[in-house]
Amino acid sequence: MNRFDRITAILIQLQAKRVVSGPALAERFGVSLRTIYRDLRTLELAGVPLYGEPGVGYSLAEGYRLPPVLFTREEATALLTAEKLAARLTDAPTVRLSGAAMDKLRAVLRRTDRDYLETLTPHIQVLGPVGQPGYLNIYQQLVTAVAAQQVVHLRYQGAETDQPTARAVEPIGLYLSRQWHVVAYCRLRQAFRNFRLDRIQQLEISTEIFAARPETLQQYWAAEAARRGRKKVVLRFQPAAAPPALVQHLHDTKRQYGWIQEEPLPNGGLEMTLLIGSLPYLATWLLPYAGAITVLEPPALREHLRELAQHAYNFFCTTE
C-alpha cells in the first residue's frame, strides 16, 4: 500500500470508529508507529480536525465527515461474496437487509465495476446443508437482542429431552459452526448455555434490559473446554483400504473432530492424533472407515465403535 492509499484508509478508520489507537493502526497497516504519527500529522495539516488523548487514541471532531470513498472492484467482490453467504446461511430479514446494502453499493460503483459485478454474480454460489431451516427468521432478532441487551424468551427443543422447555435467556453472542448457535445466560439453568437456532421453536424479545455481563464468546469457549476436558486419540489410517472418496472426506472433515497432527508411516499409512471432547461423537465419524482405521488409544474408543457396529449389525443383518 502506498502512502496516499494508507492515509486515505486511516481516515476511513477514523470515520468508522469512535477512537482509534496509534499502535492498532500500525499493526493494521504493517508500518511503524512513527510512520502512523507522521500520517496523522499529514491529515491535520490537510485540515482534518483530529483529537488525540494520550494512552487512548485519536478521534474526529463530532460531525466531521467526508463524502464516501468509492469502493474498489476487489472490495465490491468481497461484499458480493458476503451477500451470497447471508442469502444461504442466515434468515429472511438478514437476506433483505444484505440485498438492500448491496443495492446501495452498486449505486455508487463506476459503471464498469457495476457491469463486472453483474457478470460475476451467477458464478459465485454458496451451497448450504440440504433443507436449511431458515432459522424461523430469528437470526436478525437475536442480533438485535445481543446489541440491545434484551432478555429473550425461547421455546427450545434440547437434544437430550423429549419435550421443549421455556427459557428466559440473556444473549451475549452468535456463531456459525455447522449450525448457527446463540450463547446466552439461561435463567432456568442459572448458567451460560449454547442454543442451536434450528432447535428454537418459538422466540419473543421482551422489553426487559439485562445488565451487561463481562463474559465474551471466547471466554465461554475457553470455560467449556476446561469443563469438558479433551481426550487424546491416536489412530492408524490406511488410505489404500478405503475408497478414494471416503479418504478425501476424512481429510476434508478431520479438523471438525479435533485433528492436530499426523505422521506418515513407511507402509503408506498415517498416524493421526486428535483431541476430542466426546468419544461417542468421534466414533460415529470413524465407523465408515472399518478396515482402514486402527485405534491405538484410548481403548474406550474401540468399545464405542464396537457398540455402534453391533447396533448396525443387529438392525440391518439379523433375520426376523
Image: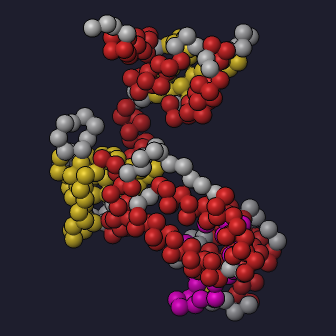
Q: What residue sits 63% from the left and 88% below the top?
A: 66
Q: Residue furthest right?
A: 2
| Residue 14, position as x, y percentages in the image | 61, 78
Residue 103 locus on image (x, y percent): 56, 77
Name the residue located 60 percent from the left edge and 34 percent from the top edge. 252
Task: Find out whether residue 41 is within the magenta segment.
Answer: no
Work out whether 214 lies above or below 72.
above
Relative depth, front residue between 81 and 228: 81
Asked if the magenta segment contains residue 66, the reply would be: yes
Query: Taking the image as drawn, is residue 175 in sight?
Result: yes
Q: Is residue 213 above or below residue 72?
A: above
Q: Quadrant of residue 238?
A: top right
- State the residue in front, 48 or 201: 201
Q: Residue at x 60, y 70 (%)?
A: 21
> Is residue 218 something one can see in this rendering?
no
Residue 111 to residue 184: above or below? below
Left or right, residue 270 beside residue 31: left
Q: Which range is magenta?
A: 56-79
Residue at 56% across / 60% down in the picture?
A: 84
Q: Position of residue 51 (x, y in %)?
A: 59, 84
Determine which quarter of the picture holds residue 7: bottom right
- Left or right for 294, reference 42: left
**Quadrant of the drawing holding the C terminus:** top left
